[in-house]
Amino acid sequence: MPAPAPAPTAFLANAESRRELHYFTLYRLLEAALLCLTVFSPFGLLLEGAPPTPLPQLIAIAYLVAAVALFIRGRRGRIVVHAAIGISVDIIAAAMAIGVMPGLASGVAMMLLFNIGAAALLLPLAVGMAAATSAFAALLAQHLWHVLNEGSAGRSTAEILMFGVSYLAITSVTAIVGRQMRSSLALAAHRGSQAESLAEVNELIIRRMRTGVLLVDGDGEIRLANEAAILQVGNAGEGRRLLATAAPELAMRLQRWKRDGRLDANPLQLAKDLPEVLPRFARLLAEGDQVLVFLDDAELASRRAETLTLATLGRFSASLAHEIRNPLAAISYSTQLLEESRDIPESDRRLLQIIYQQTRRMNGIIENVLSLARRERAQPEHVDLVEFTRQFVDEFQRTQPLDDDTVTARVPADSMPCLVDHRQLQQAVTALVHNARIYGRMPGEPARIELHAHADPRGTPLLDVIDHGPGIPEAVAAQLFRPFFTTSGHGTGLGLYIARELCLANQASLDHVPIPGGGCCFRIRLASAHAITTG
């Protein structure tokens, strides 16, 4: 199983430490070069007072070779291991140089101070303190060696102690500074990564949002545009273009808004084949001349308004239901009392039955509208679509004044079981038949409506409500099921919408099927009796 990839902050911290190690190894090269310059040039004679011996030269060359090797190897490998090896080489080389060249002891000890501090930045505190202690022990051992063998080391013990304290102090300080620096670096990298992610998310949201957004400067040039704005304004989002050239009417509205602060609420069509938009304007800065132009899809705004209207209508229907049900209950009760009277002729009793049936149907319609507003579940049951179609046509013919209109049924001989709420299906089909009687007739001719029950090749039950009228234009067909859409001055535009919602509540679908040569068909695709309902 592959190891997980390091976090971006770990990569960044590693890169920073690698850079610090690079400068550390570069400084070691400078130290080794200075040591070689000292032992191989007249400067060594001035410092030591005697010609250099082969041993100091050998130590300087060895240190230079080790410094070059560490510099080359510093580009790869573990940073902590490399730093530990490097400071160990520095301490050994410094101790040997002080031992063979006592005159350079103070300078070498001082230069070693930087090596210890630099190593403490890269090493854990415990390892850094061990390196500082080792350097102090090396200096102290050299001092004691000279005191015991030569009687005098040329330096006081206090100086050695001060170097030791300095090594430990600089190790502590640089270790703390290094830890804080790495913590700050990791925090900065994390915050930077979060900022980049938020910027990408904001850019994606603005680019993909359905509302068009344009940034227009004081000279009327389009500076920025998201994808929706490019689609609505055409190709105006690419490059720097004048808004007056891309959308003259929009530019005029923007100028009027800048002049008097008034916003025209009328929809605007920016091009012949583009949808209408509702422009809104807002200054990017309070005192700036750059303006954000928001282009809202007028159709979406209309749908939101329709949703609010439907919600209001649902609340209104809930409060109105009680007032409607009271007279319906009175009519139903009075009808039942009249049926019990012996003074009613038999010819009128049929009318009483029709009144009673229609009051019950109206009460069911009210309940369905209320359940639709409350999004209540349908109560599906096994219904024979063939028998339902026959009964619906017979009842419709008996209860409705058809005049010269005809409503017929075309059904197969075999039964066709389906799962549907019987009352809701009857309400939906009633709305479709009433709609066909109004719009599905040729001028001056009666309406001829046919209910056709059949199945598709997969066995799905279908119920078609067919008329032989002029048909529905494509422009109107695209909006048939929108609430409040109607081509009649007397309609509410809710019949087809409620019919489709009732079908959807029963896991069915209602679609408009064009008929070549004229006529119209509304097809209800029902759930088979073997379907599994999920509510």
Image (spheres, helix red, strand yellow):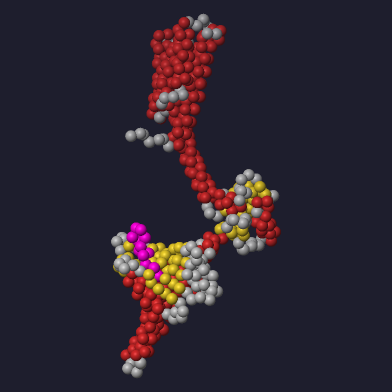
Is any atom of residue 170 visible in this view? no
Residue numbers of the magenta segment: 451-462
Between 188 and 322, the one nearer to me in the picture: 322
Quarter occupied by the C terminus: bottom left
Please report the residue visible at 61 percent of the width from the left and 48 percent of the height from the top: 235
Is any atom of residue 52 visible in this view? yes
Between 338 and 436, the one nearer to me in the picture: 436
Residue 160: name its quadrant.
top left
The residue lying furthest to the front in this view is 517
Seen in the image, is 370 located left or right of residue 222? left
Please report the residue visible at 44 percent of the width from the left and 21 percent of the height from the top: 73
Please report the residue visible at 50 percent of the width from the left and 73 percent of the height from the top: 441
Position of 217 relative to 261 (above/below): above
Magenta residue check for 459:
yes
Between 374 and 479, the one nearer to me in the picture: 479
Q: Residue 400 at what x, y percent from top left?
A: 42, 80
